Image (cartoon, rainbow, N blue to C red):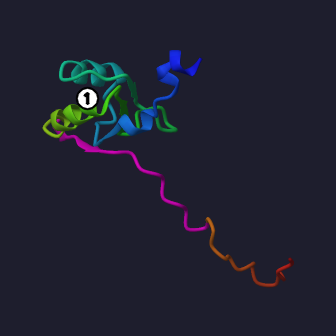
Amino acid sequence: MLGRLPFLTRNFADFKLVMLNLPWTVTKDEVARTVKALFQFERLDLPASKIGRNGGFAFLTFATEEEKQKATAALSTLEFGGRKIIVREPSERPKSKQEGSQRKPPSGVSKQN
């Protein structure tokens, strides 16, 4: 059955880019129109911050590595609202300082195992 559904076997994370340094005022439609004129993409995500504006970055997903490389070249020369766009491959989030560290208990509290 999976042979008939190739989209289930592709790992789209391999074909993803992050656009950084976007103006907070730009909309998903504006980004989509601009990049669609330059290259093909499968999906565009423009996450919003807690206060409702975009976070200044967008994720683009592509069907192939070739399309991703073409987009990287095109985006590296693009400006939005006078801001030069920075293009990177997504990476794992850095671990927080507290994650996995040996924290000392507050003074006056004994450590129990």
Q: In this picture, which residue range is highlighted in magenta? A: 81-98
Which is nearer the eye, 53 or 31?
A: 31
- Which residue shows up at 63% across the image and 73% down it? 101
Residue 91 spot, x, y in % from top left: 41, 50
Which is nearer the eye, 90 or 24?
A: 90
Chief secondary structure of the magenta span? loop
> Is residue 94 magenta-colored?
yes
Above or below — where is 75 with respect to 29?
below
Q: Quadrant of residue 46?
A: top left
Can see residue 47?
no
Residue 13 spot, x, y in % from top left: 43, 38
- Which residue shows up at 32% across the image and 29% down it? 64
The residue type indicated by label 1 comes to Glu
Regarding mark 1 in the picture, which secondary structure is present there? helix
Point out the image quarter for the N terminus: top right
Name the residue that disc number 1 marks: 67
Farthest right residue? 112
- Which residue shows up at 26% across the image and 43% down it? 87
Can see residue 18?
yes
Residue 112 spot, x, y in % from top left: 86, 78
Looking at the image, residue 42 sits to the left or right of residue 72; the answer is right
Q: Quadrant of residue 34?
A: top left
Crowd band around label 1 with a 10 angstrom C-alpha radius: few (<14), some (14–19), many (20+): some
Looking at the image, residue 28 sits to the left or right of residue 110; the answer is left
> Is residue 88 magenta-colored?
yes
